Image (cartoon, rainbow, N blue to C red):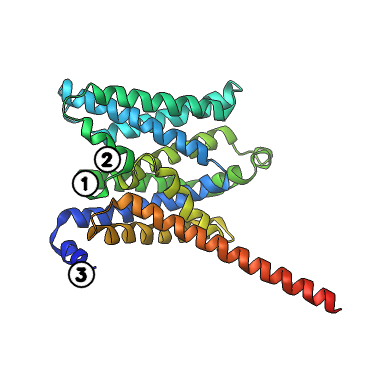
Amino acid sequence: MSEFLKALESEPFMQHALLAGLLASVSCGVVGSYVVVRRMTYLAGGISHCVLGGMGLAMYLNKVHGLAWLSPMIGAVASALAAALIIGVVSLRYRQREDTVISALWAVGMAVGILFIAKTPGYQTDLMSYLFGNILMVSARDLWLIAGLDVAVLLITAAFYKQLLAVSFDEEYAGTRGIRVEFYYLLLLCMTALTVVLLVTVVGIVMVIALLTLPTAVAGQFAGRLWKMMALSVVLITAFTAAGVALSYSPDLPAGALTIVIAGGAYLAVVVAKGIKLGLMRSRGGGEAGAK
């Protein structure tokens, strides 16, 4: 740990890594709560894998056609929003099963990304970092983009909290109250897409779903209201990402993967502890009933 603290004082990339984890945790905690409550985990997975298509296209245009301003992060934002809108519109307007649409985009997005990366000279080795994340490579430009996306998600949540809450828990009731369900559903999908882009820089495409849902699932065991779940999720994600970066430094392990292991361990520990507690309560209740 002392080596990590020394590196944190002197190395800008370590400072960027911790700041990226902190910034990403804000949107992740807020949107992850909606994802868990509305059971949209599979949808988030589909969007996350479509991100590779946008990244691959942006890298190809940047390297081959000289579009220096077009970074992989910009391509990720564009492809994530496009995937979210396609999933939402097709499932709402064309009566298609949502899971079928997501599966198709999941596969096509990954395939398109791999094809563009394969045709981009000198970029093939970056594929693993996008798939599994490399928070230590976050640049100052990426931090500004993450901060901007954070602000957008927080402003939307603050402005439409009640409407998004109603749509997440009961669409039919929300409709009877005059809430435009389709609009807020699409808005929620777009917020999920933006958050997925943030998390790609932290843990990579493959593990986005885990960081989006595991800390929130832990928070849900202790928080009875949605806003409390969001706040606790932000705290937990910040702690998990910071621990992942710190503990991975000395043994030279992938920070994203270690972050997910920590989050998964915390989730399993909470679930097991709760199960044991319920078992003890039932056994005591049964013993009291037998005594009577």
Write the residue at 42% across / 37% down. Answer: 193
Number of residues whose C-alpha sits closer than 10 Å to that of mark 2, classed few (under 14), some (14–19) or many (20 or more): some
Q: Quadrant of residue 108?
A: top left
Residue 117, above or below 40 = above
| Residue where numbered disc 2 is placed | 129
Q: In which quarter of the image is residue 261?
A: bottom left
Number of residues whose C-alpha sits closer than 10 Å to that of mark 3, classed few (under 14), some (14–19) or many (20 or more): few
| Residue where numbered disc 3 is placed | 2
Write the residue at 50% across / 36% down. Answer: 43
Q: Count all numbered tags in the image, as a single digit.
A: 3
Mark seen at residue 200: none
* Separation (CA) of disc 1 from disc 2: 9 Å
Number of residues whose C-alpha sits closer than 10 Å to that of mark 1, classed few (under 14), some (14–19) or many (20 or more): some
Residue 90, above or below 200 = above
Q: Where is residue 47 in the image (x, y as percent from the top left)?
A: 43, 34
Residue 96, above or below 170 = above
* Separation (CA) of disc 3 from disc 1: 21 Å
* Separation (CA) of disc 2 from disc 3: 27 Å
